[in-house]
Image: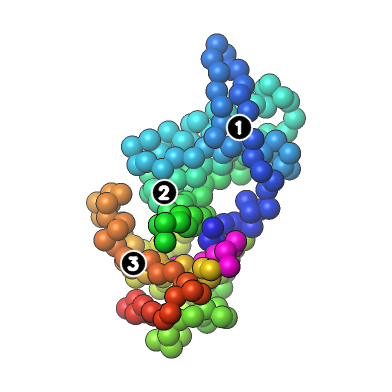
Amino acid sequence: MAGVPDWLWALPDPERRSSSGFGYGFIPDAYWSQAEPRVVGELKYGAKFEPVAIAEAVHHAHLLRRIHGGEPILSLVITQPNYWVRATITELASKALCHIEADLLTLNRQTLLWLSCPHARLGVLSSMPDDVPLHKDWTPLRWSRVEGEPTWIAHDDKHKPPFLQGPTAMISQVRNSNRYEWVLWTGQLPTLGTEWSRNDWAEAGSFWVWDTEAKATRTPLAPR
């Protein structure tokens, strides 16, 4: 896994507990009953159904609290990059609701899962983070650390999360692999008013993964 917010990485293994609501049963995709606060997660990786994840997560959190009591439960929604979900989460502005986005990359018959929170604040602009294996052409870019995760973003500082726009680069450390070290996306994020669909992500930019077992390290060109 690459990126991953620190608080999510620190959670224990989740449960999949069957519960009964008002006349029906449900099983949350993930439930961290031992965490503080408790967390219920809804996982959606299909553009047609991703907006429904918000209602499902909040609904499960409410019923689990009614059943088991205690303090409010954090609702966690994990989707692929989805601007509909981003806008809804931003408008609700609730501390009881969290959104994380995922990319799945297939490498050598393995799956690399890249998680990052598009709503997280960015730190102050700085130089390229240490130990990143990028060519000197990348040095002039100004990077911002994503608060709470091992991820950095280079952008023009004209726009703020969750809707960065234009030429952008995003790089994360891989957390639990002896083989892979970094994953990078570089490309053009859509501007406001642009029609944007799931298929557009593949054409908007390119992924790079640093593999310690590779014979040679290719270095992508810096965005302009």
Q: Are dots 2 and 1 in contact, CB under 8 Å?
A: no
Q: Tell me the residue that label 2 is attached to.
A: 80
Mark 1: secondary structure: loop
Instruction: Determine crowd level at label 3: few under 14, some 14-19, many 20+ residues with C-alpha closer than 10 A.
Output: some
Is residue 140 visible from the viewing direction of this image? no
**Quadrant housing residue 51:** top left
As drawn, 164 above or below 79: below
Label 2 to label 1: alpha-carbon separation: 22 Å
Tell me the colour scheme of the image.
rainbow
Query: Residue 14, image x and y in percent?
Result: 64, 40
- The residue that appears at 49% across and 40% down in the rendered structure is 43
Give the magenta range: 170-178
Query: Residue 172, image x and y in percent?
Result: 51, 67
The kind of residue on which mark 1 rests is Arg
Q: Are dots 2 and 3 in contact, CB under 8 Å?
A: no
Q: Farthest residue toward the top? A: 23
Which label is found at residue 16?
1
Q: Tell me the residue that label 3 is attached to.
A: 206
Say if the magenta span includes residue 206.
no
Query: Residue 138, image x and y in percent?
Result: 42, 83
- The residue that appears at 27% across and 55% down in the rendered structure is 200
Is residue 199 visible from the viewing direction of this image? yes
